[in-house]
Amino acid sequence: MTNTTIPITNITAANAPDVLVTHARTHTNIAVLVSGRGSNLQAIIDNIENGYLESANISVVISDIADAYALERAKKHGIDAIFVDPKSFTNKTEYEQELVKILDSYNTDLIVLAGYMRIVGKDMISAYKNKILNIHPTLLPSFPGLHSHKQTLDYGVKVSGCTVHFVDEGMDTGPIILQSCVPVFENDTEDTLSQRILEQEHKIYPQAVKLFIEGKLKVDGRIVRVSK
Ligand code: GRF
């Protein structure tokens, strides 16, 4: 028996492959949604280019902000960069229908939110169930939502960090994939703390993407089981 690709209609017991290949795509098509500077986008681009994410391909970067620097980063690397103006749609559903149309047209396998400052609606979540990742700069479930570094400093915690999670309909509430910790110092400002956390973000986001691509993540209710 071989592992060559056989049109699914021609398979018989005699020529059945060991592993049934139903499509010949060798790369995972990633769409990255952004609103700002795009340093996490850059970390993923760098890890594709250095071979760590060798079977990944960023097929499109979509921004809801016209002058997001992330769009420039994408163009510099030859990646399609699209601005979709939410204000040109009558409501969120229509805006997200357009996004889904674009995502589908790029045969998207995985959506990575990288500083995308909108809550994803239920239609998009159900179109891409368990295929949307987000990163948040705290140890969730602590300090979800906006101004997370300020929330962290104001609360006085001694340890913070970042979290990569699947996206559900809540705000930063989806099942957790990876987390990384950093210390919080008494003289920290939002800037110093965010820099320390960002370094960790740039490590664990590519790691989480790799686990997804390799099929090692299984969502079991709230729990993400990571296989070796
Ligand atoms: C990061 O801190 C990320 O955790 C949060 O938004 C910020 C985006 O930064 N969701 P960048 O645009 O990736 O540089």
Image: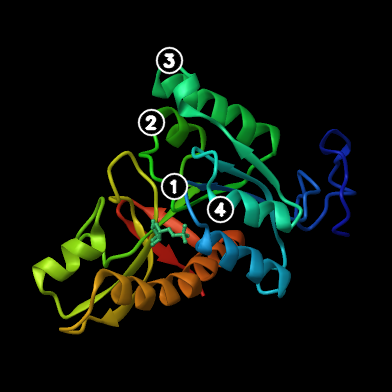
Q: CA distance from mark 3 to mark 4?
A: 26 Å
Q: Pick whichever, 214 or 197, lies toward us.
A: 197
Q: Which residue is mark 3?
A: 90
Indicate left or right for 119 with 216 as reference. Answer: left
Give the structural element (helix, strand or loop) at label 1. loop
65 is higher (above) or lower (below) than 205: above
* Circle nearer the viewer, 1 or 4: 4
68 is higher (above) or lower (below) than 49: above
Q: Which mark is residue 69?
A: 4
Sequence-wise, the earlier of marks 3 and 1 is 3
Sequence-wise, the earlier of marks 3 and 4 is 4
Q: Residue at x 50, y 20 (%)?
A: 88
Q: Ligand 1 is found in which quarter of the picture?
A: bottom left
Ligand 1 within 8 Å of the CB at mark 1: yes
Sequence-wise, the earlier of marks 4 and 2 is 4
* Circle nearer the viewer, 3 or 2: 3
Sequence-wise, the earlier of marks 2 and 1 is 1
Q: Amino acid at mark 1?
A: Tyr
